[in-house]
Amino acid sequence: MARPRKSAAGGQSARSTSRKSKAAAVEIVEEESGMTMPEAVIIVTTLIMLAAFVMLDQARGSYGDGMFFKDSATTSGTE
């Protein structure tokens, strides 16, 4: 009866070596939870830009020129 050949990996068969190398290649990486710094900067910048737009439009509304506050100059003191 013929004996199986031994591989160069110290007597382990090729089948068991390939299983171990696939299992060793998998790494579990935990993801960070919560908001990162760049995401926070984006949100804060967006909110500040929106507030600046509304405040500028309100200031232009006093001259009858704003988009949202156009009529606020004419109706604010006359009742």
Image (spheres, rainbow, N blue to C red):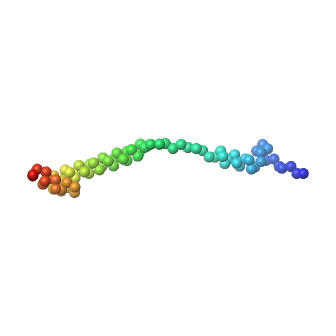
Q: Residue at x 68, y 47 (%)?
A: 21
Q: Residue at x 11, y 50 (%)?
A: 77
Q: Position of residue 15 (x, y in %)?
A: 74, 50
Q: Position of residue 10 (x, y in %)?
A: 78, 42
Please indicate whether residue 19 sits to the left or right of residue 37 in the image.
right
Q: Position of residue 9 (x, y in %)?
A: 76, 44
Q: Residue at x 58, y 44 (%)?
A: 28
Q: Residue furthest front?
A: 79
Q: Residue at x 51, y 44 (%)?
A: 31
Q: Report the number of numbered marks.
A: 0
- Residue 70 in the image: above or below residue 35: below
Please indicate whether residue 48 sits to the left or right of residue 78 in the image.
right
- Residue 38 in the image: above or below residue 71: above
Q: Residue furthest left?
A: 78
Please indicate whether residue 62 sits to the left or right of residue 46 in the image.
left
Q: Position of residue 23 (x, y in %)?
A: 66, 46
